Image (spheres, rainbow, N blue to C red):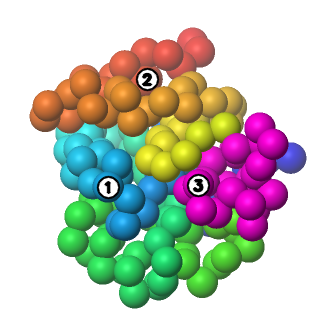
């Protein structure tokens, strides 16, 4: 089943970009603090598109503790990317379970124990929007290698099948 059908919040980003980044993070996580602004630089460095298709769209999959915490964090530190609404607990939880990514404190409640939890936060999964295949589960490392955000998206696009 297609991701857009499983997760309605992903339908528009999948249709309007070449790459989709699922950014699993929270405002309370100290490991996420340097990643979020660096990801903002990567997002801002993308080339404009003539066809209205972005190179990269980011969707924030929050592990914040409240809607207010999430909104405050997004306003202060995030780029102008999308998010799974905080109130949409079922979709956020299902997306975490689908890819096996969540904060450690969420793992038990989500049933991601016993090796089912593959990654904690922060995690940036990069998907090919055309095929919905995972290009990398370690987009955070790619983002942190770039001081100004340039070149990261080109590297991911270079990994797309011809």
In this view, the mark in front (3 or 2): 3
As measured in the structure, the alpha-carbon distance from the residue carrying label 3 to the one carrying label 1 is 13 Å
> Going by the image, does 25 lie left or right of 3?
left
Res 105 → quadrant: bottom right
Q: State whether residue 138 appears in this view.
A: yes
Measured as percent of width and height from the top left, residue 99 is found at 69, 44
Q: Which residue is mark 1?
A: 30
Provide residue 115's location: percent of width, then percent of height.
77, 38
Q: To which residue does mark 2 refer? A: 157
Label 2: which secondary element: helix
Q: Is residue 109 magenta?
A: yes
The correct choice, above or below, for 97 with respect to 157 in the image is below
Mark toward the start of the polypeptide (2 vs 1): 1
Q: List the residue tagged with mark 3.
A: 104
In this view of the protein, which residue sits in the foreground, 34 or 7?
34
The stretch of residues the image draws in magenta is 95-117
């Amino acid at each position: 089943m297609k991701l857009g059908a499983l997760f309605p919040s992903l339908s528009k980003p999948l249709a309007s970009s070449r790459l989709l980044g699922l950014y699993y993070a929270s405002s309370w996580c100290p490991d996420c603090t340097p990643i979020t602004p660096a990801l903002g630089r990567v997002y801002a460095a993308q080339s404009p598109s003539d066809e209205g298709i972005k190179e990269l769209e980011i969707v924030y999959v929050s592990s914040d503790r409240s809607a207010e915490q999430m909104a405050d964090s997004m306003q202060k530190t995030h780029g102008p990317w999308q998010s799974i609404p905080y109130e949409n607990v079922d979709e956020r939880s299902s997306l975490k379970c689908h890819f096996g990514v969540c904060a450690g404190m969420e793992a038990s409640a989500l049933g991601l124990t016993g090796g089912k939890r593959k990654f904690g936060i922060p995690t940036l999964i990069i998907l090919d929007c055309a095929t919905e295949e995972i290009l990398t589960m370690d987009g955070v490392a790619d983002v942190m290698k770039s001081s100004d955000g340039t070149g990261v998206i080109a590297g991911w696009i270079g990994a797309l099948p011809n």
